[in-house]
């Protein structure tokens, strides 16, 4: 297991944004040499549904905004906005974004959109969140939203990363849910967390697609196979991962939905991956 690198910077007094679309960074945590999270002030006008994303970024060398889609990791009720990001050494945005500190400003366009919202799914009994890497971010929002537990009897979150250390952000968030004064009682006995790794041995090693296909996921969690009558799913990861999970869900009889036409599962197509 790799040694975890966690560095946190916190801003006690929020600086006022200098520009209309600029928000102030209030906290930065570096989880590994590839992953970090940060919190920023929330525009007073911003209203969003848990699971949606916004465009955020920095000013480029040419003086123009360099923006990318980032899922909001904080729930809709939070007073601040949280984001979870990879670090790409040569990435146009993250090569610079990874160096932000508390007190810095970032550009945030307050126009949330996205498909990973409850409105895009038909009513069901169980809700699966399938994620890889920083694709965990929208589910970090939904897992902390009371509506998730009001709509579903069981919630299952799978998170696949290369190494154990890369699971730490999600692990800590899940652990904190049980003591959360808002949803702690709602989570008890109803949330199942299934972390896996692909390049380092862990309690569960292997690609989640293989673990679903062979049935081990369901055996480990004591759940029946996917059923379009009762099961709903949200998917967020790399393009290849999204396509593989989509094929598995469709093979089980689930149909893909959208905001305009709710169905049994939805896939986020604006995920921020390698190269940003």
Image (cartoon, rainbow, N blue to C red):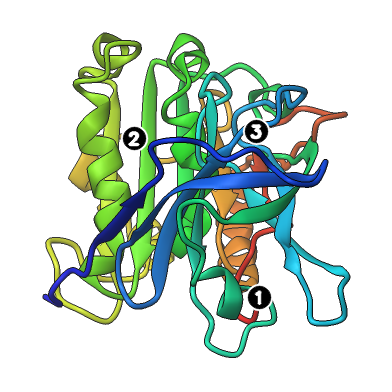
Residue at (63% x, 83% y) in the render:
91
Can you give x and y, in whole percent of width and height, for residue 229 in the image?
57, 24
Mark sitting earlier along the chain (3/1): 3
* Left or right: residue 108 compared with residue 165: right
Task: Estimate the spatial distance between the alpha carbons at disc 2 and disc 3, rounded to whole Å.
Answer: 16 Å
- Mark 1 and 2 residues: CB-CB less than 8 Å, in contact? no
Can you give x and y, in whole percent of width and height, for residue 69 in the image?
72, 56
Task: Estimate the spatial distance between the alpha carbons at disc 3 and disc 1, rounded to whole Å.
Answer: 30 Å
Task: Estimate the spatial distance between the alpha carbons at disc 1 and disc 2, rounded to whole Å.
Answer: 38 Å
Q: Disc 2 on helix, strand or loop? A: loop
Give the residue at mark 1.
276
Give the residue at mark 2.
224
* Left or right: residue 46 compared with residue 123: right
Residue 14 or 46: which is nearer the viewer? 14
Quadrant where the N terminus is found in the figure: bottom left
Q: Disc 3 on helix, strand or loop? A: loop
Quadrant where the C terminus is found in the figure: bottom right
Give the residue at mark 3.
264
| Among the 4 quarters of the image, the one containing residue 13 | top left
């Amino acid at each position: 297991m790799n040694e975890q690198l966690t560095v946190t910077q916190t801003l006690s007094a929020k600086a006022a944004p200098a520009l209309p679309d600029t928000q102030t960074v209030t906290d930065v945590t570096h989880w590994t040499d590839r992953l970090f999270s940060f919190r920023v002030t929330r525009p007073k006008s911003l209203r969003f549904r848990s699971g949606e994303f916004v465009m955020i970024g920095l000013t480029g060398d040419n003086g123009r905004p360099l923006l990318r889609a980032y899922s909001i990791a904080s729930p809709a009720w939070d007073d601040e906005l949280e984001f979870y990001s990879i670090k790409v050494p040569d990435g146009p945005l993250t090569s610079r974004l990874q160096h932000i500190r508390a007190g810095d400003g970032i550009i945030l366009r307050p126009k949330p959109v996205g498909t990973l919202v409850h409105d895009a799914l038909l009513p069901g009994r169980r809700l699966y969140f399938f994620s890889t890497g920083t694709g965990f971010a929208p589910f970090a929002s939904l897992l902390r939203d009371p509506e998730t537990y009001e709509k579903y009897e069981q919630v299952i979150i799978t998170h696949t990363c290369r190494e154990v250390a890369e699971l730490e952000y999600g692990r800590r968030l899940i652990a904190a849910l049980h003591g959360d004064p808002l949803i702690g009682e709602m989570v008890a006995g109803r949330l199942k967390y299934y972390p896996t790794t692909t390049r380092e041995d862990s309690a569960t090693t292997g690609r989640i697609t293989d673990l679903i296909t062979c049935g081990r996921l369901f055996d480990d969690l004591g759940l029946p196979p996917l059923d379009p009558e009762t099961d709903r799913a949200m998917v967020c990861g790399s393009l290849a991962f999204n396509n593989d999970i989509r094929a598995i869900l469709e093979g089980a009889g689930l149909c893909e939905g959208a905001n305009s036409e709710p169905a049994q599962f939805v896939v986020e197509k604006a995920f921020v991956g390698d190269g940003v």
